Image: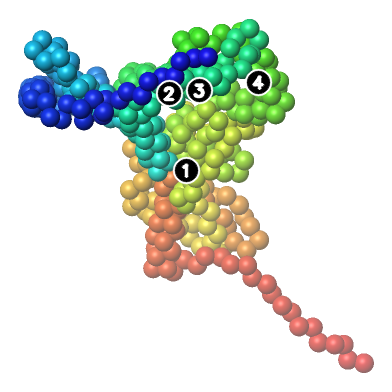
Amino acid sequence: MDKPIPFDSLLTRLIGDSQDFALLWQLGVLAVCALVAWGAMRLVKPYLERKEILWSAGRAGLRRVGFPLVMLLALLLGREITGIWFSSTHLLNLAIPLLLSLAGVRLVVYALRYAFESRETLKVWERTAAWFIWAAFALHITGLLPRIHAAMETLSFNLGSHRVSLWLLLQAAAVIVVAVLAALMLARLVESRLMGVEQMNLSLRMALSKATRSVFLVLAVLVALPAVGIDLTVLSVFGGALGVGIGFGLQKVASNYISGFIILLDRSVRIGDRVTVDNKFGEVGQINTRYTLLHSLDGTESIVPNEMLISQTVVNHSRSRRNVKVALPIQVLYDTDLEQAEALMLEAAHEQKQVILDDPGNLPGVLLKEFAENGIVLELGVWIRDPSEGNNVRSGINWAIWRRFKAAGIEIAVPQRVVRLVSPASS
């Protein structure tokens, strides 16, 4: 039978030393260490507040955890010096895990905010991580942590030739979370560096950043599991089951994931392109691992699975060039002076700022489209550089043509029907 763990805590030791003169010296050491940490942070503050992009993440992290870490180093040195004259340094022993917990909370919160986008659920994860760290600190200083550790070690089972305990699973989960968080931070750091390379195509930068994130996540799991004593061969069964699941139930997810990389690598659709897919027109705002986000002209956003951009016909309005032609058909009466109507329509086109007037190959023009049943169809064709302005340009030109036609007395043809009343034949 295992021997019971003696109940011993930093709090009980500190309470026992409350009447000891050495406690005052320890308070002085804490004050000196706090002043040293404050002075050190003041000295490096100009460097930490520099605006350069390179290593900005590291400087931002040091601003958060610099004070408790510097004070911790000074405290470790002060404890060794104080231990020369005094045998009990329980107050300093209590301050060390306190500073470690403070630095851990600040570091975890910063890592979460750096690795993930800011959202409401992120605050929940931050509070959860902070509670876990402070709970471990409370269990440590009260002396309950060794007892909980022993109890979790007794709850175990055999998985093949390996013994797996509850403590080992908890330790593995913690190591995996830390490794994944570190991998996400490294991926974010690489992504920020890639996005700063303006000479490289944006789609290629996106593909490299997403591939880097995937590689880092896989490496994090492969490194974290052996670090806690879990053999990777144990996961072979789970890997086979995962492969079967991807083959049957997750094939669409895998297809969209692979299609996302194909789109980014072959650059058939790029961020900022105006495309039409599945009768949805919009500007490509994001190309994620599973879907592509289209921003429509009316403010709505369409989530299009990446597989659709590979398997269906996609109309890219701005792949080779962003110029778009806007056609405005207008029907006038047969007795209209067509040359005058043409001149007025061109005047209306030239007064619009969005219309291209400096490119000889894309100048406004009027075509005689058709001799229709109710009149002659003239079509004004103009080119613009921003497809999202198509509706505004169309409306502006139509208003200008209407005013000019009305002032010149030109009528726009409307459907007409002639009704003949035939009287009945007399008997």
Labels 4 and 3 touching (C-beta < 8 A): no
Say if 298 sits above or below 276 in the image.
below
Residue 31 x/y as whole percent:
8, 27
Tag of residue 295? 1
- Locate residue 333 relative to residue 252 in the image: left or right: left
User: For the residue labelled by badge 1, is the local secondary structure a helix, a strand or a loop?
Assistant: strand
Calculate the distance from the C-alpha at mark 2 to the C-alpha at mark 1. Answer: 57 Å
Calculate the distance from the C-alpha at mark 3 to the C-alpha at mark 2. Answer: 9 Å
Tag of residue 147? 2
Labels 2 and 4 touching (C-beta < 8 A): no
- Locate residue 70 relative to residue 234 in the image: left or right: left
Amino acid type at circle 4 is Leu
Residue under numbered circle 4: 242
* Residue displayed at 54% across by 33% down: 291
Viewer-nearest residue: 259 or 410: 259
Amino acid type at circle 2 is Arg
The colour mode here is rainbow
User: For the residue labelled by badge 3, is the local secondary structure a helix, a strand or a loop?
Assistant: helix
Residue 87, quarter of picture: top left
Labels 3 and 2 touching (C-beta < 8 A): no
* Label located before the other in sequence (2 or 4): 2
Viewer-nearest residue: 217 or 273: 217
Residue 94, quarter of picture: top left
Residue 216 x/y as whole percent:
45, 16
Calculate the distance from the C-alpha at mark 4 to the C-alpha at mark 1. Answer: 35 Å
Alpha-carbon neighbours of circle 1 within 10 Å: few (<14), some, or many (≥20)?
A: some
Mark 1 vs mark 3, foreground winner is: 3
Residue under numbered circle 3: 152
Residue 117 x/y as whole percent:
38, 35
* Label located before the other in sequence (4 or 3): 3
Residue 113 seen in the figure:
no
Residue 139 x/y as whole percent:
36, 29
